């Protein structure tokens, strides 16, 4: 299959391009499109056959469910068997926007979408292209991030092509995405709502809207996660990535000593301080605010591979607010999951190939 790439203006999406993409969706095909978070790989959420094509194109494990995207909040009632007051409050406050809610599903939603679960994840994206496409198709659109499974989520059309060229019908190129990491996922089917994946909408914002909420466990690789996607190592560049957390002076010294230990390798260091330079490594400034880091992180991880870097050392990020979500992604990309400790672990993790 040849992938047709179309540039589309987010401020004024061309109606004929949107119609062409909507036709592909209605015929059961795949369309990649921009959202405010990352690019999505869309298919008709009501068709098992169409949804299975998503899993095949991405090489996604069959037990990892998809998010269903809608453009009209009333569609919640077709997809969810029960819409609690908490859902209505969150929808009024944060939709369209980077918040996904998990509810009990209706029979309309095929098990292929939910990977056999009786719950469904739903979101309304805040992007004019995504909204126009959903409306024109007249369908709820199942869409995971448009990367091959295990790679960083795509924040530009170039990333989508790298992973999926020839596997999708149409790619709508709306330029780089604004937020850069995926939506917050909150499960509203438990007695106390639970954040399954941190994102731009923070736990504190959700609490202010609906009261008590459980935050995700720190460990990125829990054994029996409620959100199946959270158990996989994600976002990983081919290079080994080691995340160094702790107070700044300790982090800097630890990174300097790791550089010395691995002299001879092609090393990059991701720093959050514009003026910091690490001799012996290629220093890459990834932004000093959580917003900036989020916007650039997945692109930078992909560039590490393009540049043939074999070891990436990353400083940790302040975990307040949105920083918590950025750290979550860094920890999942890192082979050490962000362990701060000690020489034994470092040596093992760097030697293992
Ligand atoms: O920002 C985003 O959410 C992007 C854009 C394209 O909308 N989409 C995205 O989809 O990141 P994906 O498939 O890459 O991540 C969906 C996450 C996974 O961690 C999955 O396990 C979880 O949502 N999820 C989906 N349905 C679920 C359900 N019924 N219960 C629990 N977790 C669910
Ligand atoms: Mg994904």
Image: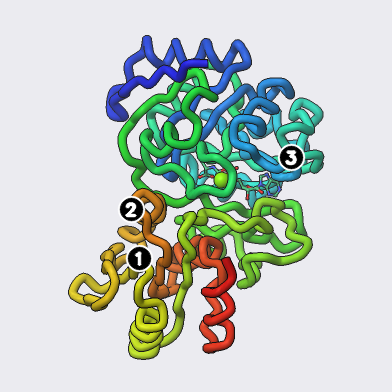
Task: From the viewer's perspective, tell me whether residue 151 is left or right of residue 187.
Answer: left
Label 1: state its secondary structure. loop
Tell me, yes or no, whether the two marked residues, 2 and 1, touch with CB atoms within 8 Å.
Answer: yes
Label 3: state its secondary structure. loop
Q: Give above or below for 108 relative to 225.
A: above
**Label number found at residue 266:** 1
The quarter of the image that holds ligand 1 is: top right
How far apart, in angstroms, are the residues tagged by discs 2 and 1?
9 Å
Q: Residue at x 55, y 74 (%)?
A: 351
| Front-most of residues 280 and 287 | 280
Q: Give above or below for 233 relative to 108.
A: below
Q: Give above or below for 47 relative to 248.
A: above
Q: Residue furthest front?
A: 264
Q: Nearer the viewer, mark 1 or mark 3?
A: 1
* Quadrant, the C terminus: bottom right
Q: Residue at x 70, y 44 (%)?
A: 64
Q: Residue at x 59, y 36 (%)?
A: 58
Q: Which residue is mark 3?
A: 62
Label 2: state its secondary structure. loop
How far apart, in angstroms, are the residues tagged by discs 1 and 3?
36 Å
User: Which of the colour schemes (rainbow, by chain, secondary structure, one colour) is used?
Assistant: rainbow
Label 2 Cα crowd, 10 Å radius (few <14 / some 14-19 / many 20+): few
Can residue 83 be seen at all in this image of the molecule?
no
**Label number found at residue 75:** none
Q: Nearer the viewer, mark 3 or mark 2?
A: 2
Q: Which residue is mark 2?
A: 307
Q: Residue at x 47, y 16 (%)?
A: 2
Label 1 beta carbon within 8 A of ligand 2: no
Q: Tell which circle, 3 or 2, labels the residue nearer the N-terminal end.
A: 3
């Amino acid at each position: 299959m040849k992938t047709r790439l179309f540039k589309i203006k987010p401020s004024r999406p061309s109606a004929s391009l949107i119609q062409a993409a909507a036709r592909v969706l209605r015929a059961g095909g795949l369309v990649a499109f921009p959202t405010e978070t990352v690019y999505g790989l869309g298919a008709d959420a009501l068709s098992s056959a169409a949804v299975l094509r998503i899993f095949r194109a991405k090489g996604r494990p069959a037990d990892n469910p998809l998010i269903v995207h809608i453009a009209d909040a009333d569609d919640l009632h077709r997809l969810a068997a029960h819409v609690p007051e908490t859902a209505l409050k969150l929808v009024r406050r944060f939709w369209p926007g980077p918040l996904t809610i998990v509810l009990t599903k209706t029979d309309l939603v095929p098990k292929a979408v939910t990977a056999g679960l009786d719950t469904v994840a739903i979101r309304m994206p805040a992007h004019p292209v995504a909204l126009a496409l959903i409306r024109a198709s007249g369908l709820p659109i199942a869409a995971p991030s448009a990367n091959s499974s295990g790679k960083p989520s795509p924040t530009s059309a170039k990333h989508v092509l790298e992973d999926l060229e020839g596997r999708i019908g149409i790619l709508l190129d709306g330029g780089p995405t604004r937020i850069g990491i995926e939506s917050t996922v909150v499960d509203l089917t438990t007695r106390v709502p639970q954040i399954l994946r941190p994102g731009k909408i923070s736990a504190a914002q959700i609490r202010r809207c609906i009261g008590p909420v459980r935050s995700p466990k720190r460990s990125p690789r829990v054994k029996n996660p409620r959100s199946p996607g959270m158990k996989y190592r994600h976002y990983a560049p081919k290079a080994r990535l080691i995340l160094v957390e702790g107070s700044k002076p300790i982090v800097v010294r630890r990174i300097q000593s790791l550089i010395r230990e691995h002299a001879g390798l092609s090393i990059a260091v991701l720093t959050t301080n514009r003026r910091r330079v690490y001799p012996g490594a290629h220093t890459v400034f990834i932004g000093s605010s959580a917003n900036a880091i989020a916007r650039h992180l997945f692109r930078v991880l992909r560039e590490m591979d393009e540049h043939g870097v074999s070891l990436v050392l990353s400083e940790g990020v302040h975990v307040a607010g949105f920083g918590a979500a950025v750290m979550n992604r860094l920890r999942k990309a890192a082979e050490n999951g962000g362990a701060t400790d000690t020489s034994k672990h470092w040596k093992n993790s760097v030697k293992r190939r």
